[in-house]
Image (tube, rainbow, N blue to C red):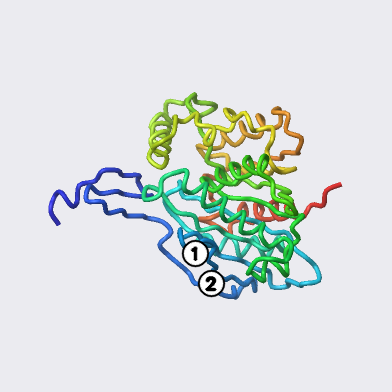
Amino acid sequence: MDSTTSEILHDFVNLMRVYKDGRIERFEGNDIVPASVDPITGVQSKDVEIAPEIGVGARLYLPANADRQHKLPVLVYFHGGCFMIQNPFSKTYATHLNALVSQANVVVVSVDYRLAPEHPLPVAYEDSWVAIKWVASHFKGDGQEPWLKDYVDFERVFLSGDSAGGNIAHNMAIRLGSEKFDGINILGLVLNHPFFWGEEPIGNEGAETNYHSKVLMDRLWRFVNPSTVGSDDPMLNPAKNQDLPSLGCSKVLVCVAEEDLLRDRGWYYYEVLAKSGWKGKVEIMETKGENHVFHLYNPTCESAVAMVKRVATFLNQRED
């Protein structure tokens, strides 16, 4: 291989490498597993096309005990990976969502949105919006997907995601605050270690030991979103979004991890949302001694099991 071919333009360690000749190496999300019936939980999964003309699809999950007579909540899930790696079909997400579907007894639509840098932001946001509209198109018994038509209670729709997927879920809820769909109720939002940031450091972000991490986060955001105004972009820093009080759901659960660089941003989101004038209820769960998206990399540990249980409880709480 000659020096021109092997020259690196962008190197995000353990995530992605972009070479001068245009080649892209992704270091996570390559372990694709087929849709199936999970032998541990009995959860069924299948892959569907949502907008094949642009490459948007999803993996759907159905609990083992699903019954057409008892409609279930539906969770629209957005995977993480800094907007540039991972997908709904990797072993990481199959394992996590099989466990969550089994515990919470919900239908899940795990969205396959297009990734940067081939498809820089806002493509992932637009793809995710297409997926939400596709889910909503089934609420009158219309649409082509029987798992949505036959099993879903469209008064109990949730959005969720981890890391970059948490960012997407939040921004979809912001958009739903102004662009509502008839017949579908976005009841809640679950943000797992969401990727939020800002120009001015808060909490431990300002520590000298985190200087290089701050530079990396700023650089990563500009890499996946070249048209951004910077790290105070309202899509990245919710505190800068004037539409925050109009968040289009009635309750939010924010999950953070004690050792995560993004921990303070999760707490900041919780505090800013609670004071914004938004009329809903926001809760927060902090997991001690754990790091960013630990539940994906160590799904059977005690902390991960407890986190899934808390999310399941949130999804099934009936409103007063």
Mark 1 surroundings within 10 Å by alpha-carbon count, few (fewer than 14), some (14 through 19), many (20 or more):
many
Name the one closer to the observer, 19 or 39.
19
The Cα–Cα distance between marks 1 and 2, rounded to whole angstroms, is 8 Å
Name the one closer to the observer, 75 or 262.
75
Q: Indicate the position of residue 32 as horizontal and vertical percent values.
A: 45, 66
Which quadrant of the figure has residue 156?
Answer: bottom right
Left or right: residue 56 versus residue 116 is right
Left or right: residue 224 versus residue 301 is left
For mark 2, give the secondary structure: loop
- Identify the residue shown where x is 46% and y is 58%: 54
- Above or below, comparing residue 65 to residue 23 in the picture: below
Q: Indicate the position of residue 186 as horizontal and vertical percent values.
A: 71, 49
**How many tags in the picture?**
2
Mark 2 surroundings within 10 Å by alpha-carbon count, few (fewer than 14), some (14 through 19), many (20 or more):
some
- Above or below, comparing residue 4 to residue 151 in the picture: above
Amino acid identity at mark 1:
Phe
- Above or below, comparing residue 103 to residue 263 in the picture: below
Question: Mark 1 or mark 2: which comes first in sequence?
Answer: 2
* Residue at the farthest left position: 2
| Residue that mark 2 sits on | 35
Q: Indicate the position of residue 200 as horizontal and vertical percent values.
A: 49, 24
Name the one closer to the observer, 280 or 312.
280
- Above or below, comparing residue 214 to residue 137 in the picture: above
| Residue that mark 1 sits on | 89
- Identify the residue shown where x is 35% and y is 46%: 13
The N terminus lies in quadrant: bottom left
- Identify the residue shown where x is 66% and y is 34%: 270
Q: Indicate the position of residue 6 as horizontal and vertical percent values.
A: 19, 51
Amino acid identity at mark 2:
Ala
The numbered disc on residue 289 is: none
1 and 2 marks in contact (CB < 8 Å): yes
For mark 1, give the secondary structure: loop
